[in-house]
Image (spheres, rainbow, N blue to C red):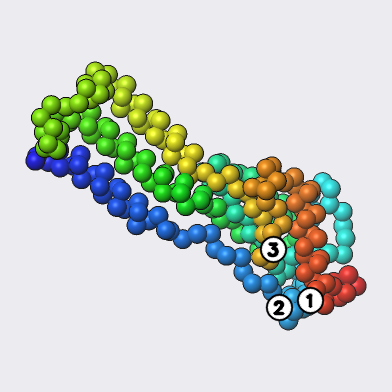
Amino acid sequence: MDRVQLLLVGLPIFLFCSDIINLFGPKPPPPPPKPSHAHNFHQHHHRSQVPPQTLDFPSQKPSGIGGIGYGNTININFCSSCSYRGTAMNMKNMLEAQFPGVNVILANYPPTLPKRLLSKVIPVVQVGVIGIVVAGEHIFPRLGFMTPPPWYFSLRANRFGTISTTWLLGNVVQSFLQSSGAFEVFCNGEMVFSKLKEHRFPGEIELKDLVEQKLVKSRMEDGVGANLWS
């Protein structure tokens, strides 16, 4: 077996093995634990040292909860292959402007395990089909077929069309399998909004109100809500 044939046979095997190894990669980091009462009180004690922020959100009005974001974490887990990063960045900037001091973390939300497995098989199929079209007459005898099957000659008749169709169609299928369609928002580990459940994106005003309710509730449960509103 010459170098070209060895490359055509070994490359799909190498890609498949490497994808299986990387399949169980790191998932989005879990939301951090809820901040303690002492930490919240300490952050509130130093709140007066922070210069006042300009409220640039149209619907926001000056209020006494400007420092409510300190010591809190918001996780936005979105589908990176769905081009949701721009929306996630806009939401991150809006939340940081509305709640100074809040920690907004963006992370990819992976698809389900069956879709991840199938997405790893697509590149192997693409390389295999292209390899058969390019060097099928030399591969089939080594596999025990003295004469290539009839479908091989159909693919070989339009070699360029077969290769381009296999590549483009495989990329479309792989992109679909790698997408989760998720845009999940968590505040201190509690879900605030789920696109997978609502089947839509949250509005900026809607998300601001939902996060504000969670932050106020969290402070009231910690017993320091009275200090914040005084």
Q: Is residue 93 visible?
A: no
At horizontal 31% and vertical 53% (from top left) the residue drawn is 18
Q: Position of residue 146 (x, y in %)?
A: 10, 30
For mark 2, what is the residue? 36
Count all numbered tags in the image, as a single digit: 3
At horizontal 39% and vertical 30% (from top left) the residue drawn is 168
Q: Which label's residue is closer to the chain start, 2 or 3?
A: 2
Disc 1 element: loop
The image quadrant where one finds the C terminus is: bottom right
Q: Residue furthest top?
A: 157
What's under tag 1, amino acid-wise? Answer: Asp
Q: CA distance from mark 2 to mark 3?
A: 15 Å
Q: CA distance from mark 1 to mark 3?
A: 15 Å
Quick one: label 1, few (<14), some, or many (20+) residues within 10 Å? some
What's under tag 2, amino acid-wise? Answer: Ser
Disc 3 element: strand
Q: CA distance from mark 2 to mark 1?
A: 8 Å
The label number, if any, that marks residue 222 in the structure image: 1
Horizontal side of residue 123 vs 153, given as left or right: right
Horizontal side of residue 148 vs 102, given as left or right: left
Disc nearest the viewer among 1 and 3: 3
What's under tag 3, amino acid-wise? Answer: Glu
At horizontal 61% and vertical 65% (from top left) the residue drawn is 31
The image quadrant where one finds the N terminus is: top left
Disc nearest the viewer among 2 and 3: 3
Q: Nearer the viewer, residue 35 or 158?
A: 158
Disc 2 element: loop
Quick one: label 2, few (<14), some, or many (20+) residues within 10 Å? few
The label number, if any, that marks residue 185 in the structure image: none
Quick one: label 3, few (<14), some, or many (20+) residues within 10 Å? few
At horizontal 13% and vertical 26% (from top left) the residue drawn is 147
Q: Which label's residue is closer to the chain start, 2 or 1?
A: 2
